[in-house]
Amino acid sequence: MTEKNKTLFAIIATGLLSFLGTNLLTGLNIAMPVILKTYDIGTDLGQLVNSAYSLIVGICILMSPYLLKRFATSQLFRSSIAIFTVGLLISGLASNFAILLTGRVIQGIAAGLSVPLMFNIIIAKVPKSQRGTFIGVGTLLLTMGPALGPLYGSLVLHFFNLPWLFLLMLIVVFISLVLGFKTVEPLTKPQPIKLDWGGLILITIILSCLTFGLSFISSSVISPVISIGSLVVAVITTIWFFKYSAKQTNPILNVTVFHNRDFRDQNISFFLSQVAPPAVGFLLSIYVQTVDHNSAMVAALILLPGSLLSALISPASGTLLDKLGAKKTIGLGTILLTLGLALFVVSTAHHLGIWEAVVIYFIFMSGIGLTTGNLQTSGISSLTNQQQSDGDAFFNASQQYSGSVGTALSGTVLAAYQTGKVGNSLVAGTATGTQISFLLFLILALISDFLLFKVFRSQK
C-alpha cells in the first residue's frame, strides 16, 4: 500500500466515526416523536439525547489539543472505536430513557475524539499541495452525516424500530476499525504534559449549567428558580473562567484571542448562526409528524434536498470566498439564512405545507452552506499565526456546542406550549411553539448579522 493510500484510508477511517456522530444527531431528530412516545417523556427531556451529546462533544474537542499531545494517534483512534461501540450498545439495548441518554453521552466522548483526530492526520501527513483535496474528503464525510441522517432515521423506523438506529451503526464502526487498524499510526511521540484541570472544570460547569438551564426553564417538573439559577451560575463561572485563564501559562483555551474585536465578533456571530441548523431540523421533524400527521419518511424527505445542498456547498464555498471575498460570500449566506428563518416565522403563523417547507429549508440551508466554513476561515485569519490554533479551537467548540443550545432552546419552548395537552390542543400547542422558536432563532440571526456588519464595515 502506498503512503498516499495509507493516509487516505486513515482519514476515511476517522472520518467515518465523525460521520456516524453527525448522522445520528439528525437521525434522532426524525425519531424524536417515537422517543417521546416510547419513554413517555416531554420534549424538554427528550431533546437531551442531542443536546447532552453535543455538550460532551464540545468539551472533548476543547480537550483535543492536550489529548493529541499526550497520547498517540493510534491510541486515540482505538479508544474512539471502543467507546463508540459501548455507547451504541447501551443506547441500542436501553430499557429506559436514562440508559438511552447514558449511551448518547458515551457516544459524545468518542465523537469528540474523532473529529480533531481526522484533521490532525491531514495536517500532519498530507503535503500542502494536496491538503485541499484531502480536507475536501474529510469535510464531505462530516457534512454528509447530517444530510443523510434524517433519511437514515426514517428508513430504520419504517423497516425496524428505535434500537436499530444505534445497533446498525455498529457496521460503520467495524468498517472504520478495518480501515484504520493498520493505517492510523502514531504521528508524534506522546509528551508528558499536564492538563489544565481548573480550566476544564470551569468550562464543564459553564456548558452543563447553560444546557440544563435552557432545557428545563419551562419544565413543569423542575422549578424555574433552579433553571434560572443554573443560568446565573453559568454567567458567573464564565467571568471567573476568563479571569482564571488570563493568568495561566498553559490554559486549556487562550482567551486573549478575544482581545481581537474582529475575531470576537465573528466568533459570536458564528455561534449564533450555528444555533439554528440542528434546531430547525428538530422543529420541522416534530411539526410535520405532530401537526401535519405525516410519517417520519415525509419529514426526512422534506429535509433531504436542503441538507444535501448544504453538504455539497460547504466544501466548495471556500472557492467563492477566494474569488468574491468574505464580505460578499458570507453576506450572501447570512441573507439567505435570515430570509429562511423569516419565511418559517411567517409560514407557521398559518400552516406550513410540505412543499413550502422544502423550499424554505432549501433557502435556509444554502445560507448555512455559504457561511459555516467561510465565517470560521475569516475569523481565524484575523488572528496572528501564533493565535490561530487557539482561535480554531474556539470555532470548533462553538460549532459543536451551539447545536446543544439550539436544541435545548427549541425543546424548552415546545415543551412550554405542549405540556399537559392532548389531541387538537397538542397540535395547536406544537404549531405555536414551533413558530415562537423560529422567531427566537430569527432574532439571534439578526444579532449575528449586526455583528458581521460591524466587522465588514471596519474592514473597508
Image (spheres, grey):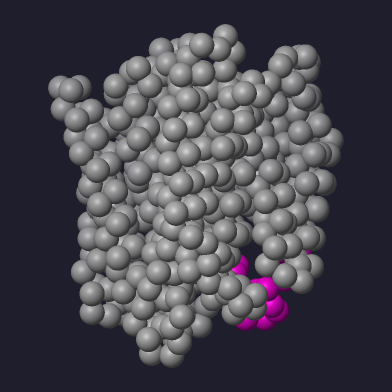
Question: Residue 120, how many percent across, how many down?
Answer: 63, 28
Does residue 228 show up? yes
Segment colored magenta: 152-167
Question: Residue 371, how many percent across, how many down?
Answer: 34, 42
The answer to whether 314 appears left or right of 382 in the picture is right
Residue 38 within the magenta-colored segment of the rendering:
no
Residue 307 lies, with reference to residue 320, above or below; the image says below
Of all residues shown, which one is farthest toward the bottom? 423
- Which quadrant of the rendered structure holds the N terminus? top right
Viewer-nearest residue: 202 or 80: 202
Viewer-nearest residue: 11 or 22: 22
Indicate the quadrant where residue 118 lies.
top right
Residue 316 lies, with reference to residue 438, above or below; the image says above
Residue 361 lies, with reference to residue 5, above or below; the image says below
- Which quadrant of the rendered structure holds the C terminus? top left
- Give the residue drawn at x 76%, y 37%: 77
Does residue 304 show up? no
Residue 158 within the magenta-colored segment of the rendering:
yes
